[in-house]
Image (cartoon, grey):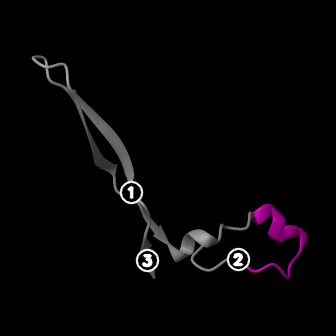
């Protein structure tokens, strides 16, 4: 199951040369997503050698 994460954003600042006024705009520069799979990490094979009862995490 996939869920959305918060996108990475940037601020774009533009200066009006005539007035000197600055405007600011927030834009998405990198969409992000978070998968349920990201809660777990793979167990290193070197660790599974020490204890045979270890089971690898799902999807790894």
Report helix, strand or loop for mark 1: loop
- Dot 1 crowding, Cα within 10 Å, few <14, some 14–19, many 20+: few
Q: Which quadrant: the N terminus?
A: bottom left
Q: Is residue 39 magenta?
A: no
In the rendered structure, which disc, 3 or 1, sits on the residue that comes first in sequence?
Answer: 3
- Give the extent of the magenta segment: 45-55
Residue 34 vs 11, above or below: the answer is below
- Image point (57%, 77%), residue name: 59
For the residues bearing labels 1 and 2, Cβ distance under 8 angstroms: no
Q: Which residue is mark 2?
A: 56
Q: Where residue 2 appears, x then y in whole percent?
A: 43, 77
Report helix, strand or loop for mark 2: loop
Q: Is residue 51 magenta?
A: yes
Report helix, strand or loop for mark 3: strand
Q: Which residue is mark 1?
A: 7
- Image point (90%, 69%), residue name: 50
Q: Which residue is mark 3?
A: 2
């Amino acid at each position: 199951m996939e869920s959305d994460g918060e996108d990475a954003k940037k601020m774009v600042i533009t200066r009006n040369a005539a007035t000197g006024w600055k405007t600011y705009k927030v834009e998405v520069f990198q969409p992000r997503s978070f998968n349920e799979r990201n809660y777990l990490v793979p167990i290193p094979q070197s660790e599974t050698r020490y204890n045979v009862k270890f089971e690898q995490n799902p999807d790894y």
